[in-house]
Image (cartoon, rainbow, N blue to C red):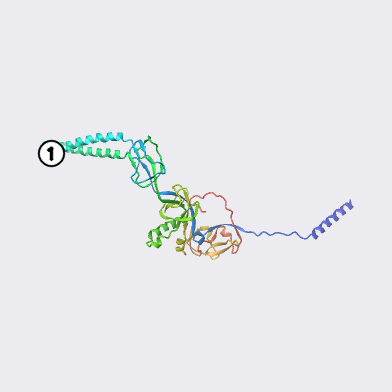
Amino acid sequence: MLGYTTKRAAAALLLSALVACGGQEETVVVEQTRPVKTFVVEGGAGNTMRSFPGRVDASLRAELSFRVPGRLQEILVKEGDLVEEGQVLARLDPTDYKLVYEDRKATFDNSKSNFTRAQELVADGNISRMDYDRMEANYRTASAALSQAEQDLEYTVLTSPFEGRVARRMAEQFEEVAAKQSVFTLQNNSQLDIIIDVPESVVRMVRRMGDLDRSVDSDEDEGVTEAFAVFEGHSSEKFPLRPKEIATKANEQTQTFRATFTMESPTDFTVLPGMTTTVLLDLSRLIGADAGTVKRVPVRAVQGDSGLQPRVWVLDPEAMTVSAQAVTIGRMSGDRVEVTDGLDGGEEIVAVGAPYLAEGMKVSRMAVTEQAVPRSGEPL
């Protein structure tokens, strides 16, 4: 038994010696980084060009309908036809309206004759003033009824109010149509509306674009624009856009504002209402004019140093380290605070995780994952 124990001890000693001869195992040290969420300050050179999906519509468009009901007797144009101003597009069966017109015409002629005789009789005192007033009232009523019948007869003919193209026809020949029921959609595509939805951060600048364009007086300034449309298949061409109207109330679902621009229709290829485009907003002139003005950053990005002076942590994207930048802050609105000095625009600052940072600390960007949309009033 003693011999067996001695052998086991010798084997353990030999194994220890072999491990010692093999050297120590290398230890790999992994450098720790702190994950943070970043925010790019608006106003930098890389932030001056923004792109938005846009939709095309005709600047001049109308839904055409008859002002009286009836049966469609003639449809004289097809979808896609180019029509002139005043051209007849369709007619209703006028039979019933002609009968009404003839009846009221007879009533009018009779009341007119009675009123003419009454003018002579009342002057001689052969009829009372009351009878004369009654005949005059009948004459005026018949005249108004005849004018209405004449108008209704004219309304059985539908004409084009402007030069354009028939985009759509919504009724068939011999169909009964109601008054004000849409029969044609007419569009003039010589000028196009380009509609985009822009966020709150951009709508202020878009409104200023409209103010600048309305204030220019010289021909040289009128050629300057900050908005362009680019169409699929023609990406090398940029078509200047002019601000037309900008909504002042945000969409309740998307919280974006609708901005409408106009442009001349391209001559070398076809662009039709309903098509899509990409709108480029060049904000460099506006951002350049606003150099040194306030920037708006998340409230949580601003921290106090040891002297309780406000600062932000600026990320070096190459070294992935942060450095403190002193700032001057202004008013707070919602989850944003104004920075009036200390930032030029375009910097990437830490928005989440700022209280746990130190000068020169290594950080990593948080992975972007789908999150629930915060409710109104909640911080980001």
Residue located at (31% from left, 36% from top): 94
* Amino acid under disc 1: Glu
Q: How many marks?
A: 1
Q: Residues within 10 Å of mark 1 (few under 14, many from 20)?
A: few
Residue located at (41% from left, 57% from top): 210
Please state if 116 lies on the left or on the right of 190 as rendered. left
Depth check: give the residue in front, 94 or 118: 94
Relative image position of residue 202 (x, y in whole percent): 46, 56
- The residue that mark 1 highlights is 120
Q: Residue furthest left?
A: 124
Res 39 visible:
yes
Image position of 102 with respect to 368: above or below: above
Relative image position of residue 334 (x, y in whole percent): 48, 55
Res 134 visible:
no
Relative image position of residue 354 (x, y in whole percent): 56, 59
Depth check: give the residue in front, 313 or 230: 230
Relative image position of residue 374 (x, y in whole percent): 51, 50
- Label 1 sits on a secondary structure element that is helix
Depth check: give the residue in front, 56 or 366: 56
Image position of 228 with respect to 142: above or below: below
Residue located at (40% from left, 62% from top): 221
